[in-house]
Amino acid sequence: MGSIRERAMAESGRLLVVDDERELCDILAEYFGGQGYVVVTAGDAAAARELIAESVPDLAILDIRMPGEDGLSLARWLREHHKGVGIIMLTTAADVVDRIVGLELGADDYIPKPFELRELLARVKSVLRRLREGAPRPPRPGRVRFGRCELDLDTRKLYDGSGAELPLTAMEFDLLKVFAERPNRVLNRDQLMELAHNRGWEVFDRSIDLRIMRLRRKVEPDPDKPEVLKTVRGMGYMFASGG
């Protein structure tokens, strides 16, 4: 009889709560258990790693401020070893820097303490829904999504969906940066040459075409049917930011 309830709870999701406040762990376990989730709790990062070794959760709720290894370090480890796990960080209202760092490490969302249980539930549902539908995570601060990739404007690097860095020349970065700053706007070859003309571009039209062709091989799911760096016949190219 219990197996039916266990299957129903597993369908809602398996949650891992990591917080050194025992009372908060108990409250979240009881609340989310009542909402149909399978919940396990840990008081520190070491205990969390042991639980993850036994069964990888669908989503982890991590407190940033914990004695010993903190939640940021645990989030980094999760992203390196279990990329498909959703991560929600628990922060204090004043931890602005920690929230930014958490998002840069790959957290899906954060919620400041104290929080309403219903709001946390809504965020958990949103992250799990996005993961199950295969939707990409929101770009991290300072990054722009190009199809299956993300461009980091600060470090001038391009990353694929798994977080691996892709080779990118200086001229290719300049071209992507131009598009990133002008999404959903048609730019002709002359405009692209002028806006990105600071690294010795060859002054002929085909140089633009060749570089866009190379970029499409990196960012487009199907380079033969581009949906990110689109050709607008007779006019030029457009970065479709929602593509």
Image (cartoon, helix red, strand yellow):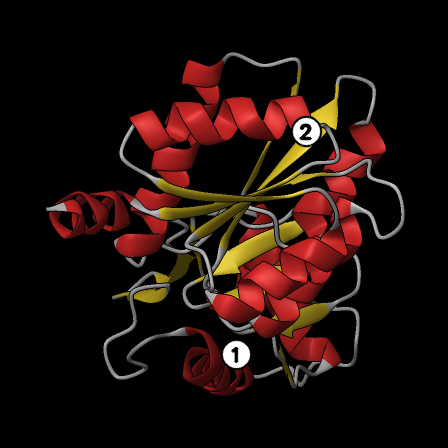
Element on which disc 2 rests: helix
Reading the chain from its start, which is encountered first: label 2 or label 1? 2
Element on which disc 1 rests: helix
Give the vertical position of 183 relative to 163 (above or below).
above
Give the vertical position of 183 relative to 82 (above or below).
above
In which image quadrant can residue 171 be found?
A: bottom right
Toward the right, the furthest residue is: 68
Toward the front, the furthest residue is: 1
Q: Residues within 10 Å of mark 1 (few under 14, many from 20)?
A: many
Amino acid type assigned to the residue bearing label 2 in the image: Arg
Judge by depth and name the residue closer to the eye, 30 or 101: 30
- Residue 85 in sight: yes
**Residue depth check, mark 2 versus mark 1: number of the one nearer the observer:** 2
In which image quadrant can residue 165 be found?
A: bottom right
Q: Which residue is mark 2?
A: 22
Amino acid type assigned to the residue bearing label 1 in the image: Ile
In which image quadrant can residue 173 be found?
A: bottom right
User: What residue do we see at 68% from left, 29% from top?
Assistant: 22
User: x, y (%) of residue 130?
Assistant: 34, 47
User: What residue do we see at 36% from left, 45% from top?
Assistant: 128
User: x, y (%) of residue 101?
Assistant: 77, 45
Give the vertical position of 97 relative to 83 (above or below).
above
Q: Which residue is mark 1?
A: 208
User: x, y (%) of residue 200?
Assistant: 78, 81
User: What residue do we see at 63% from left, 77% from top?
Assistant: 172
Judge by depth and name the residue closer to the eye, 176 or 160: 160
Q: Residues within 10 Å of mark 2 (few under 14, many from 20)?
A: few
Judge by depth and name the residue closer to the eye, 14 or 199: 14
